[in-house]
Image: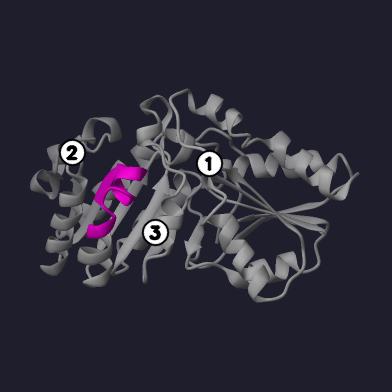
C-alpha cells in the first residue's frame, strides 16, 4: 500500500530507470533495453558496462526500434524501449499498433520528458497528446507516475505484463509524493487527501501542485479531495463515480492536452453514469510545445497551483 512521503526532494527518474532495469536484468536474462540514441541523456549506457548485449543502441530510428523490440518479443524476450515521449508514440505509432498491439507482442515503452518537461529541446520534442494516442490502442496499458517510487513500481509491474505498456515520465526529478516501498494497483486511483466540497484529479508532474492547491483552498474554507489517477488505462471508473457524485465541482489537472487525456477519461465516466457534477479540465489547449525552461513553460501554459485555486473560486465562490 502507498504512504505519502514527508520529504520533498526526490532522485532523478532517469536514475530510477537505470537502477530498476539493471535489477530486472539481473533477475531475467531475457530482459533487454533499446535506446534511440539517448543513452547518454538517460544514463542507460551504464547498463552496457554491466549487462553487455542486453543494451541495444537502435540509433535515431524509433519506428525501427519498436519493430526490433516486437521481433525479440516473438522469441520470448522482454523488451523495454526508451526515447522522448513524442518519438515513442507519434513517430512510431504504426509499428506500436501493428507490430506490437495487433500482433500480440510485448513492448514496454518509457516515453520520457512529456509535455513541458522537454524544456530546451523544444516543440519538436514535446508532446501533449501521447496519452490520447496510446489509450486508444486496444489492450495497451498507460501509466503516468508522479515520482521515483511510483515510477520504479510501474517499471517492475509492466515487466510482468504481456502486450504494449506505456509509461510517460519526466527524466529529471519531481517533488517526492510517496514513501519508499509504497505499492500501488493497476486500475486504481490513489486518494491522497480527503475533502467533501470538490475533487481534483491529477497525474504525474502536476500532482504535487494539486496537493498545494488543496492546501490553499482550505484557507478559503473549501475542502478538496485529491486523487492520483496514475493508471490511465486501465482506469478507475469506480473512484471517479464515487468521488464526483456529491461534489460541487470536479477538476482535472494534467501536463497534457485537455482532449484525450485525463480530462477526457473523467468526462467519459461522468457522462456514461449521468453524474451531473460540473467538470473543469485544466491542461493544454490548442497549443504546440515550445523551447524554454520547463518551469517557465509550465507557467506559460497556466498549469499552476494558482490557476487551480482561482478556477475553483470562480466556479463555487468562497
Q: Position of residue 142 (x, y in %)?
A: 42, 59
The residue identified by callout 3 is: 134
CA–CA distance in space, label 3 to label 1: 19 Å
Q: Position of residue 318 (x, y in %)?
A: 91, 44
Q: Is label 3 in a helix, a strand or a loop?
A: helix
Whichever of labels 3 and 1 marks the residue nearer the N terminus, that label is 3
Using residue 275 as the reference point, say whether residue 36 is left or right of it: left
Whichever of labels 3 and 2 marks the residue nearer the N terminus, that label is 2
The residue identified by callout 2 is: 60
Circles 3 and 2: CB distance less than 8 Å? no
Whichever of labels 2 and 1 marks the residue nearer the N terminus, that label is 2
Q: In the rendered view, would you say 74 is above or below 282?
A: below
Using residue 221 as the reference point, say whether residue 210 is left or right of it: left
Closer to us: 243 or 287? 287
Tell me, yes or no, if residue 215 can be seen here: no
Q: Position of residue 250 (x, y in %)?
A: 73, 57
Residue 317 colored magenta? no
- Which residue shows up at 37% across the image and 62% down it? 157
Q: Position of residue 125 (x, y in %)?
A: 35, 35
Q: Farthest residue to the bottom: give it.
A: 273
Instruction: Give the magenta range.
Output: 81-95
The residue identified by callout 1 is: 205
Amino acid at each position: 500500500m502507498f504512504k505519502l512521503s514527508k520529504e520533498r526532494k526526490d532522485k532523478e527518474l532517469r536514475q530510477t530507470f537505470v537502477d530498476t532495469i539493471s535489477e530486472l536484468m539481473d533477475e531475467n536474462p531475457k530482459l533487454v533495453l533499446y535506446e534511440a540514441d539517448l543513452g547518454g541523456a538517460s544514463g542507460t549506457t551504464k547498463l552496457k558496462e554491466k549487462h553487455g548485449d542486453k543494451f541495444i543502441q537502435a540509433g535515431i530510428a524509433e519506428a525501427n526500434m519498436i519493430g526490433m523490440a516486437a521481433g525479440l518479443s516473438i522469441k520470448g524476450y522482454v523488451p523495454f524501449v526508451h526515447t522522448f515521449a513524442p518519438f515513442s508514440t507519434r513517430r512510431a505509432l504504426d509499428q506500436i499498433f501493428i507490430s506490437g498491439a495487433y500482433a500480440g507482442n510485448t513492448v514496454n515503452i518509457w516515453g520520457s520528458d512529456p509535455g513541458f518537461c522537454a524544456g530546451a529541446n523544444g516543440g519538436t520534442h514535446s508532446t501533449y497528446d501521447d496519452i490520447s494516442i496510446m489509450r486508444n490502442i486496444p489492450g495497451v496499458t498507460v501509466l503516468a507516475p508522479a515520482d521515483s517510487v511510483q515510477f520504479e513500481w510501474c517499471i517492475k509491474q509492466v515487466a510482468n505484463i504481456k502486450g504494449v505498456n506505456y509509461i510517460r515520465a519526466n527524466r529529471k526529478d519531481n517533488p517526492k509524493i510517496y514513501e519508499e516501498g509504497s505499492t500501488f494497483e493497476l486500475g486504481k486511483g490513489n486518494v491522497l487527501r480527503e475533502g467533501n466540497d470538490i475533487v481534483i484529479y491529477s497525474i504525474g508532474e502536476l500532482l504535487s501542485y494539486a496537493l498545494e492547491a488543496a492546501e490553499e483552498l482550505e484557507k478559503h474554507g473549501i475542502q478538496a479531495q485529491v486523487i492520483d489517477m496514475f493508471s490511465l488505462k486501465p482506469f478507475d471508473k469506480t473512484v471517479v463515480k464515487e468521488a464526483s457524485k456529491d461534489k460541487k465541482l470536479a477538476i482535472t489537472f494534467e501536463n497534457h492536452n485537455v482532449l484525450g487525456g485525463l480530462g477526457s477519461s473523467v468526462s467519459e465516466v461522468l457522462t456514461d453514469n449521468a453524474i451531473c457534477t460540473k467538470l473543469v479540465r485544466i491542461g493544454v489547449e490548442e497549443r504546440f510545445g515550445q523551447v524554454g525552461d520547463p518551469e517557465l513553460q509550465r507557467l506559460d501554459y497556466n498549469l499552476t497551483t494558482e490557476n487551480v485555486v482561482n478556477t475553483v473560486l470562480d466556479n463555487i465562490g468562497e
